[in-house]
Image (cartoon, grey):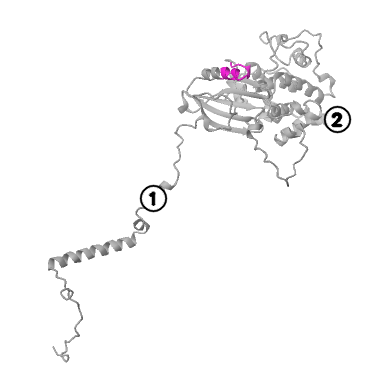
Amino acid sequence: MSRSHPNWRPAQPRLALAQLGIGISHAHKRLLLRCLTISLLFIASGCNAGTSFQNPFAPDPKLKEPLTVGPNASPTPATSSPNALPADFPVYPQARLQSTTQTPDLGTVTTWTTADPIDFVYKFYQQELTAKQWEIVTPPSDSNPLLTAKQAQTTVSIEPQTSTDKQQTGVTTFTISLLGATDAATTTPTPTPTATTHTPTTSPLPTTKSIVKLPTATADYVKDLNQIGVLTSAESAPNRIVTRREYARWLVAAHNRITGSQPTQQVKLATTDTKPAFQDVPSTNPDFPSIQGLAEAGLIPSPLSGDATSVLFRPDTPLTREQMILWKVPLDTRQPLPTASLDAVKQTWGFQDAGKIDPKAMRAVLADFQNGDRSNIRRAFGYTTLFQPKKTVNVGEVATTLWYFGANSEGLSARDAVQVER
């Protein structure tokens, strides 16, 4: 076709496979086209697939986070918390540690669970603590399911707890409270000072060191009682458990000093020629005047008040909450304690464990409720739905109750006594 022809187009240059010396059949051409098409599709899909296609061998991002154990897994073994109790303190082999709390007022309180009955736990600790030179102060009983032992300045209390969890059927829960010598286990060691470090050569007074660990209000109570001579510096350690003899001594001393302007309201101290009311508190006992004086006044249960079973005072036994209230409330109300029932205590205080309160103490607990915000229970323990009547009390709680005597607004405090002495 000549260039002058209207349909003439310049010939497109092309390179035949034959010119390259490649021989290919028609069937092979079709196969080659299919392969090219599939390759293009893979390339296109790779561009749209994002990071999943670009990095097909990357690790599963879900596996980057550590696995966590659910709430239904086995609890932590007892040995997993080395700071919960001293290293040499015996741990019940079948028990599991559930929680550990540390407070200025209560010290170290650990909660444990086991499938064994509480009697097995008691037997174990009575044997082990005795073997380790602990003194069993209060063995557990049906009326007082509390095991208390003492070694030097450290006191341990082991007490069963009632669980409201229906899934915990067949599981025994108990707490171990360690008071007295816990500072060494929880205090951070002081680093060795360098040449440029100036270490103070004087240390704070024992009373100040103890009081600063208490809440502000409680610290003021301890300080006021210290100023009027009820508590000494050595007795002001806030976490230390109070014994029955100490409370009897402080109760009489605090009451007589605070009500010093009212001689007719004083508790008379007994003389050494008085016949002892308790077999274990002879007249030679240094606390005989206070303990015997309370018994003579009918303020504590004794054979003098018609309680033939209270022939022993047990002066070195730790004081419990219900005993503290039972001895103190009559000095507040100055009236016979009211008749009390379990329902009455539940309706007023709302205590879930009201059934554990001793019937003699229940009357004082009910009367204390009528004292409003001046109630000993409210001031010492705050708002609570558990009274825990068999639980031991410490110096801070005792000081709070002894700071004030009286009903409602008609009373006197240790602060009043401090101001009078000035």
Could you say which is closer to the camera, residue 320 or residue 264?
320
What residue is shown with label 1? 59
Q: Left of 381 or right of it: where is 257? A: right
Q: Name the amino acid, label 2.
A: Val
Q: Residue at x 41, y 47 (%)?
A: 62
Q: Give the left or right position of residue 378, taking residue 161 as reference.
A: right
Report x, y in % for residue 335.
Answer: 74, 19
Q: Which residues are magenta?
A: 125-140
x, y percentage for residue 79? 52, 30
Q: Position of residue 331 (x, y in %)?
A: 75, 21
Q: Is residue 153 magenta?
A: no
Residue occupying image coordinates x 78% and y 37% = 202
Within the magenta stretch, is there residue 135?
Answer: yes
Tell which of 332 and 16 is nearer to you. 16
In terms of secondary structure, where does tag 1 sit?
Answer: loop
In the picture of the structure, the residue carrying the numbered disc 2 is 420
Q: Is residue 262 above or below residue 43?
A: above
In the rendered structure, the answer to whether residue 292 lies left or right of residue 28 reads: right
From the viewer's perspective, is the residue at label 2 or at label 1 nearer?
Answer: 1
Q: Who comes first in sequence, dot 2 or dot 1?
A: 1
CA gap between label 2 and label 1 equals 79 Å
Q: Is residue 359 above or below residue 386?
A: above
